[in-house]
Image (cartoon, rainbow, N blue to C red):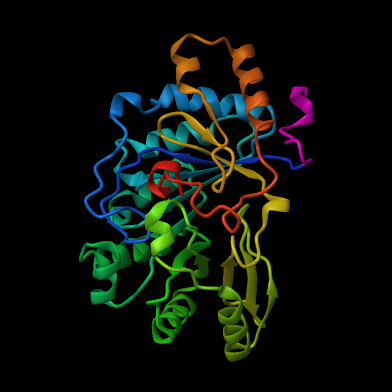
Amino acid sequence: MTESSGLIDPFGRKVEYIRLSVTDRCDLRCNYCMPKGFKGFEQPPNWLDFDEIERVLSAFARLGLARVRLTGGEPLLRKDLPKLAARIKSIPGIDDLSLSTNATQLSKHAVDLKQAGVDRINVSLDSLDHQRFAEITGRDSLQKVLDGLEQAHRIGFAPVKINMVMTPQTSEQELDDMVAYCMDNQFVLRLIEIMPMGDTGRNAGFVDLQPIKQRLQQRFDLIDGVVPGAGPARYLKSKDGSFSIGFITPLSQHFCATCNRVRLAVDGTLYLCLGNEHKFEFRPLLRQGISDDELLEAVQHAITLKPERHEFRESPQRIVRFMSHTGG
């Protein structure tokens, strides 16, 4: 593989998108993501520092990386995140920088993030009901989230996407309320099937989005649509184009054949697939003084480890890590 040929995995897929976890900490405790009382966080000395992050992403960019998403944990808990965002956006070849957040800290940081070059924001929000929000997240922070969304909308982030995880406890009324909220605010709504990562994810319960998609399509007279981004969502939109809703379906309609992404955890572990244990450790190499040419070779080798598809259905007990560690 040469620099000009891009990051091509063994199955012919071009990898051009990294989801970068900048912390495994979070100020919420969503019951499908993190076990109650969990304290097994990575120690900050093991986190990649900003220089190390920039170096790894620069190597990826030389090979064809074009898109980076800042994730966590909750990425806004990482000190000086806007400074890191600006450094990433200045890397030649990276032309799209986005952020996934729970938005509890967003009102404080939105302006700095916009100025740093963050293009788009995804916000995790599973209910607009204060009691249900507190039950899901373990925190009474809904108003902070709504304030953050209002600020993001005010200063011009577009599109703003709302990520809503569907669980057996999610009512039709909750979903319809979220649709109305997103319509009123010109937000893109995305519904997500829970991935069975660890006992926490498996115990949360699976909801097939296909019947929900059919109901919403009929109720709101939606047609097939497209929304900017590099993720796996399949979209419907209103006929006037004013509202879009996406469906992320790793189980009921998996998207492995077109997977273009890998995840770099805060400790420098590159995860090649959410549903398999394939990974590559960059931190030891960086701290042993690897050269730039050797780093390029390491990136090229890492991509050869990417599996063809996940095995959530076939081997649901295989993955024991949590999304907060892997990166959202």
By secondary structure, the bulk of the magenta-drawn segment is best described as loop
- Viewer-nearest residue: 294 or 100: 294
Please tell me whether residue 184 is drawn above or below residue 80 in the rendered image.
below
Q: Pick the quarter of the image with the N terminus.
A: top right
Quarter of the view holding residue 57: top right
Please tell me whether residue 283 is drawn above or below residue 85 in the rendered image.
above
Q: Is residue 5 magenta?
A: yes
Q: Image point 32% across, 60% down: which residue?
A: 30
Q: Residue 186: x and y, percent?
A: 50, 73
Total numbered labels: 0
Q: Is residue 289 magenta?
A: no
Q: Residue 274: x and y, percent?
A: 54, 47
**Residue furthest toward the bottom?**
219
Span shown in magenta: 1-12
| Residue 243 appears in the rendering | yes
Please tell me whether residue 228 is drawn above or below residue 111 in the rendered image.
below
- Viewer-nearest residue: 130 or 308: 308
Q: Image point 38% across, 66% down: which residue?
A: 125
In this rendering, position of residue 58 left or right of residue 30? right
Q: Residue 29: x and y, percent?
A: 28, 56
| Residue 244 appears in the rendering | no
Q: Image point 61% across, 76% down: which residue?
A: 210
Q: Image point 54% across, 32% down: which residue?
A: 90
Please tell me whether residue 235 is drawn above or below residue 312 in the rendered image.
below
In this rendering, position of residue 291 left or right of residue 42? right
In this rendering, position of residue 163 left or right of residue 23? right
Q: Residue 37: x and y, percent?
A: 21, 51
